[in-house]
């Protein structure tokens, strides 16, 4: 089995091309792949950046992946590969249909409503776009990175669970506040 083999998907879905062919045929897809890798690395590192490395910039770092994601979407839309499937249409419809419920149930706070829509709707379509820009090799590398990072995340989760809610392990991102608590005086360990 070669590492550059194309991923065979079900009937009606586009095939993921080998990385070398993608780079030669369409530099836009190669750019989207690089941006997707930047997004993936930030996804893995965002919590550590917000909590331990740059706690004073925690709020700004909460949105650090969004410009990269929007650029990926822009390039995908211009390349004609943005996934406008039924799932995404339903997701966006539900997201926007929830606006009146948010207004009437908890008061009108536009920032909270927009942040909720961002959280629920913005990042989801990337799941359906990745098979169109990632190669087999990219998928294997992403899996290996997750496997390599897992022991460190496990160590953090264990320490968070065993620590008291007031312990520095359980300080919220930004250095103030606490993590969400569950039963028994334990926190929901976020890693």
Image (cartoon, rainbow, N blue to C red):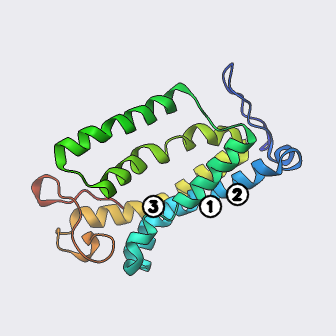
How far across and down, in percent of the image, does residue 31 sit?
74, 55
Q: Are marks 1 and 2 in contact (CB under 8 Å)?
A: yes
Mark 2 falls on what kind of element? helix
- The residue at 61%/34% (across/down) is 83
**Please, which residue is most extreme toward the right here?**
24
Few, some or many residues within 10 Å of mark 3 (<14, 14–19, 20+) = few
Question: Horizontally, is 54 left or right of 14 in the view?
Answer: left
Q: Earlier in the sequence, mark 2 or mark 3?
A: 2
Rounded to the nearest angstrom, the CA distance separating label 3 from label 1 is: 22 Å
From the image, state whether disc 3 or disc 1 is nearer to you: 1
Question: Horizontally, is 155 left or right of 76 in the view?
Answer: left
Q: Is residue 140 visible?
A: no
Mark 1 falls on what kind of element? helix
Residue 90: image quadrant is: top left
Near-viewer residue (186 or 36)? 36
How far across and down, in percent of the image, does residue 171 sit?
26, 72
Give the numbered dot on residue 151.
3
Query: What residue is shown with label 1?
Result: 38
């Amino acid at each position: 089995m070669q590492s550059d083999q194309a991923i065979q998907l079900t009937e009606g879905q586009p095939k993921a091309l080998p990385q070398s062919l993608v780079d030669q045929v369409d530099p836009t897809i190669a750019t989207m792949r690089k941006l997707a890798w930047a997004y993936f690395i930030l996804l893995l590192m965002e919590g550590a950046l917000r909590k331990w490395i740059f706690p004073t910039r925690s709020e700004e770092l909460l949105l650090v992946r969004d410009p990269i994601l929007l650029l990926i979407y822009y390039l995908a839309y211009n390349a004609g590969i943005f996934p406008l499937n039924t799932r995404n249409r339903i997701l966006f419809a539900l997201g926007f249909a929830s606006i009146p419920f948010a207004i009437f149930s908890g008061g009108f706070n536009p920032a909270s409503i927009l942040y909720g829509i961002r959280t629920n709707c913005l990042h989801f379509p990337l799941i359906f776009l990745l098979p169109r820009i990632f190669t087999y090799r990219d998928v294997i590398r992403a899996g290996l990175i997750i496997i390599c990072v897992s022991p460190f995340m496990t160590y953090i989760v264990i320490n968070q669970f065993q620590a008291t809610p007031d312990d520095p392990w359980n300080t919220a991102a930004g250095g103030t506040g606490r993590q969400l608590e569950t039963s028994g005086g334990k926190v929901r360990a976020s890693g």
